[in-house]
Amino acid sequence: MVDPTGLAVDVTTGSGHQLRLDAGGDEGKRGGAGPKEALLAALAACTSMDVATILRKKRQKPTGYQIAVSSDSAPEHPKVFVRISVEHRVSGAVEPEALRRSIELSATRYCPVSAMLSASVTIEHRYRLQREGEQTRSELVVVTGPQ
């Protein structure tokens, strides 16, 4: 259902879930995420679920996991994404190589959202790992994209 202004849409997915997308007004006054923002959220959700599942299979034990996604858009309409950065922020007893490989597998093999976006935009996949008693470790894992 589209609201009378045409700037907000209530969507029912094929599985019956509902969400509201809202492209109007100020950020604080919106009733939902903007469509591009929702696309980045879908990327974050897709890749984080992959990575968490792979880490579990590798018997890794993170105590914290956040994911941050940022982007740059073209200045002209349709203002498509020209670069996306995905950073997995993990803490706990996780081996760096296990985390690196989990992210690589998600980015290059398992996450369909990443695959679809990579057909048209460069995506940097990186991590920041904080293990107890150690300095934070950051690494660029892989860059995907149309190149």
Image: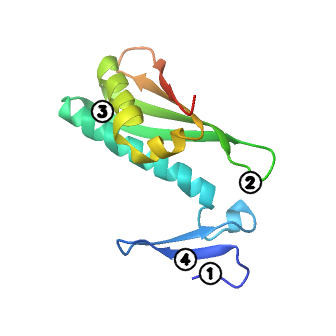
Q: Quadrant of residue 129?
A: top left
Name which residue lies at 59% across and 41% down: 120
Image marks 2 and 3: residues in contact by CB distance under 8 Å: no
Residue identifier under label 3: 62
Residue identifier under label 1: 2
Query: Which circle's residue, 1 or 2, is located before the other in the chain?
Result: 1
Residue identifier under label 4: 10
Between circles 4 and 3, the one closer to the viewer is 4
Query: Which circle's residue, 2 or 3, is located before the other in the chain?
Result: 3
Gap in angstroms between the C-alphas marked 4 and 1 = 6 Å
Q: Is residue 62 left or right of residue 126?
A: left
Disc assigned to residue 108? none
Gap in angstroms between the C-alphas marked 1 and 2 = 21 Å
Query: Which circle's residue, 4 or 1, is located before the other in the chain?
Result: 1
Image marks 4 and 3: residues in contact by CB distance under 8 Å: no
Q: Residues within 10 Å of mark 2 (few under 14, many from 20)?
A: few
Query: Which circle's residue, 3 or 1, is located before the other in the chain?
Result: 1
Q: Residues within 10 Å of mark 1 (few under 14, many from 20)?
A: few
Amino acid under disc 4: Asp
Gap in angstroms between the C-alphas marked 2 and 3 = 39 Å
Amino acid under disc 2: Pro
Q: Is residue 76 left or right of residue 18?
A: right
Name which residue lies at 55% across and 76% down: 10
Q: Residues within 10 Å of mark 4 (few under 14, many from 20)?
A: some
Between circles 3 and 1, the one closer to the viewer is 1
Amino acid under disc 3: Pro
Q: Position of residue 77 (x, y in %)?
A: 78, 53
Gap in angstroms between the C-alphas marked 4 and 3 = 36 Å
